Image: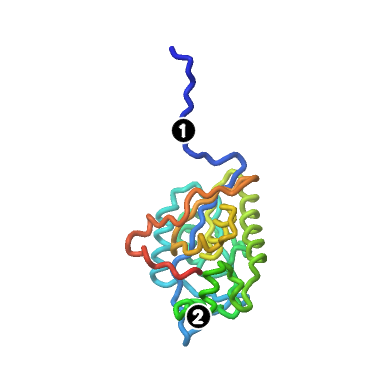
């Protein structure tokens, strides 16, 4: 018998004390219309899901209902609660609200962001070039956005050591979470997650580990191009 030791490759396992976050971007929300402004919550646009977004929510539920999920988190904005509802009902869990993971505040562009981007507003080019939301007049300062997103994730992870949770959030927030995990200031490198997509993050006491970004395999071809621009 050989005395040579072998060292196999092994699949990733969640480290002791870590928390796994299955981060879902909310389903597609209602279109922006000049004649029907979105309702607002604390100064932020609060559209409901579109019919396509509701279908995406059910497909997310189909994908995740058999995972060992300890909790479901949403934000203060209704599109996340509506996206989480089918999954939470199947799991028998009441969604919890984490206010610090609400979408970045867009200042003077709240309720008009999509129009300005589609029409090529001069600030839109600067926004993309600099990769900062706060080039928009009155928008949330970049440092404040980073700090609260970090705090929200840390708070959830601390409450769920050795557990897996689903967190339904927004495109800008996902971009910030992934950039934080990757150790980069380039938030916009990860902005553009599809509606209904799932990203996978493992939070340990020492680091954040990206396991997956923007998985849309559960959505099918019908929803492969339905993501809203940026937020």
Q: Is residue 91 above or below residue 8?
A: below
Label 2 SS: loop
- Mark 2 vs 1: CB contact within 8 A: no
Identify which residue is drawn at 57% across, 78% down. Answer: 40
Which residue is more in the foreground, 84 or 130? 130
The residue under label 1 is: 9
On residue 50, which mark appears?
none
Q: CA distance from mark 2 to mark 1?
A: 51 Å
In the rendered image, which quarter is residue 146 located in?
A: bottom right
Q: What residue would you read off at disc 2?
A: 121
- Image quadrant in which the N terminus is located: top left
Give the left or right position of residue 10, taking residue 203 as reference: left
Residue 108's spot in the image, x, y percent?
A: 59, 80
Outermost residue on the top side: it is 1
Q: Residue furthest bottom?
A: 35
Q: Tell me the mark number nearer the camera, choosing from 2 and 1.
A: 2
Instruction: Categorize mark 1 by other alpha carbons within 10 Å: few (<14), some (14-19), many (20+).
Output: few
Task: Give the x, y percent position of residue 65.
Answer: 44, 52
Q: How many other residues sit within 10 Å of disc 2, few (<14), some (14-19) or many (≥20)?
A: few
Residue 7 on image: x %, y % = 48, 27
Q: Compare marks 2 and 1 and give the one earlier in the sequence.
A: 1
The residue located at (47%, 37%) in the rendering is 11
Compared to residue 183, the image places residue 15 above or below, namely above
């Amino acid at each position: 018998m050989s005395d040579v030791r072998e060292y196999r490759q092994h699949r990733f396992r969640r480290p002791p004390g870590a928390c796994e976050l299955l981060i879902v971007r909310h389903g597609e929300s209602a279109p922006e219309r000049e004649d029907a402004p979105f309702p607002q919550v604390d100064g932020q646009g609060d559209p409901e899901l579109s019919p396509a977004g509701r279908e995406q929510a059910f497909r997310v539920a189909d994908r995740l209902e058999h995972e060992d999920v300890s909790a479901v988190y949403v934000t203060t904005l209704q599109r996340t609660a509506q996206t989480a509802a089918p999954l939470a009902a199947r799991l028998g869990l009441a969604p919890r609200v984490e206010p610090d993971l609400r979408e970045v505040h867009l200042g003077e562009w709240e309720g008009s962001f999509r129009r300005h981007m589609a029409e090529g507003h001069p600030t839109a080019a600067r926004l993309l070039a600099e990769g900062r939301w706060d080039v928009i007049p009155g928008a949330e300062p970049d440092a404040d956005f980073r700090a609260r997103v970090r705090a929200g994730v840390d708070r959830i992870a601390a409450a769920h050591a050795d557990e897996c949770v689903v967190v339904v959030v927004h495109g800008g927030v996902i971009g910030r979470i992934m950039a934080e995990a990757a150790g980069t200031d380039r938030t916009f490198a990860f902005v553009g997650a599809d509606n209904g997509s799932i990203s996978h993050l493992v939070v340990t006491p020492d680091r954040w580990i990206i396991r997956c970004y923007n998985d849309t395999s559960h959505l099918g071809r019908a929803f492969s191009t339905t993501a809203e621009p940026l937020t």
